[in-house]
Image (cartoon, rainbow, N blue to C red):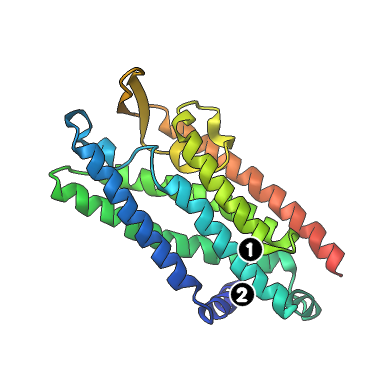
Amino acid sequence: MLQNIKIELLKIRRTHTFLMLFVIMIIASLWQLFVINSELSHSNLHNIAAFYNNQTVDCLILPIMVSIFASKIISNEKEGQTFKLQQSNGTEIYRIFLSKILLMVSTSIVLFVMETTFRYVYASINGIHTSVMLLLLFLMGQVLTVFSLICIFLVLSLLLNKQGIVLAIGFLFGFLGTVMASRSQSILSFWLPGTGNAYLAPYKYHLIDNAQLSYEYTLDQYLPVRLLIYILFCLLIYMIARMVIRRKEISLI
């Protein structure tokens, strides 16, 4: 498996995908900085919740970023017609799929650590202390979210011949995630497209005055339950993705 991951890494290094993902994350961080500054300007929002809430830019950016990543690494295989070649060499398509998941998750973790460090440093500059536990919970939510998205978009990239459709679905997920982020307070909203980050955010949005659009963030007391639910949700998505890949593998023989 480690050898397969190294091969995937060599493949992707020949493209500008890593640079593209890095630029997307920089844009997301700068955009998030603007949002955070806007909220810190209000006295009732000048606290740690402004940095780790469910109205995050990541709800828009993550599905788009993952769809680009997935479509890129699968289109490389399709263009080179390497799936059948690797099968003839005794490599199962499922193992290739698994190595791509691990590569994408590892890359995402590196980007998330960078983004979270940025949030931590900026919070410290504004005199706001962030506990290690909060940072870990925030990172865990990001990793679980991206894992579910990776499984979905890798399968879509494998099944669909036109990668433009995959990218369109990524943008659709991003749009839906942004629109429905405020509905992530419900413990049963884990399935809403693109809202994983919002669902697992440590702080949740609450409207105080509908007429004046006044709101606040409160600490999610059910976050451990949400994490458990989303882990089970990720396992379900992974099992479905695995089943689809197995069937696709048979059709390629």
What is the C-alpha distance between the residues marked 2 and 1? 9 Å
Tag of residue 253:
none
Tell whether 110 sits left or right of 77: left
Residue labelled with disc 2: 4
Quarter of the image with the N terminus is bottom right
Q: Residue at x 37, y 45 (%)?
A: 138
| Res. 195 in view | no
Q: Which class describes the residues within 10 Å of circle 1: few (<14), some (14-19), or many (20+)?
A: some
Tell whether 192 sits left or right of 121: right
Instruction: State the image coordinates of residue 114 (x, y, percent, origin top left).
Output: 33, 60
| Res. 179 in view | yes
Instruction: State the image coordinates of residue 202 (x, y, percent, origin top left).
Output: 36, 36
The image quadrant of residue 56 is: top left
Q: Residue at x 76, y 54 (%)?
A: 244
Q: Secondary structure at mark 1?
A: helix
Q: Which class describes the residues within 10 Å of circle 2: few (<14), some (14-19), or many (20+)?
A: some
The image quadrant of residue 155 is: bottom right
- Residue situated in front as seen by the camera: 25 or 239: 25
Instruction: State the image coordinates of residue 225 (x, y, percent, origin top left).
Output: 47, 31
Amino acid type, residue under disc 1 in the picture: Leu
Q: Residue at x 24, y 51 (%)?
A: 120
Amino acid type, residue under disc 2 in the picture: Asn
Instruction: State the image coordinates of residue 233 (x, y, percent, origin top left).
Output: 59, 40
Q: Earlier in the sequence, mark 2 or mark 1?
A: 2
Tag of residue 98:
1
- Residue situated in front as seen by the camera: 131 or 29: 29
Q: Secondary structure at mark 2?
A: helix
Q: Residue at x 14, y 50 (%)?
A: 125
Query: Do the numbered discs 2 and 1 sit on residues whose CB atoms are within 8 Å?
Result: yes
Relative to 45, residue 21 above or below: below
Relative to 237, residue 78 above or below: below
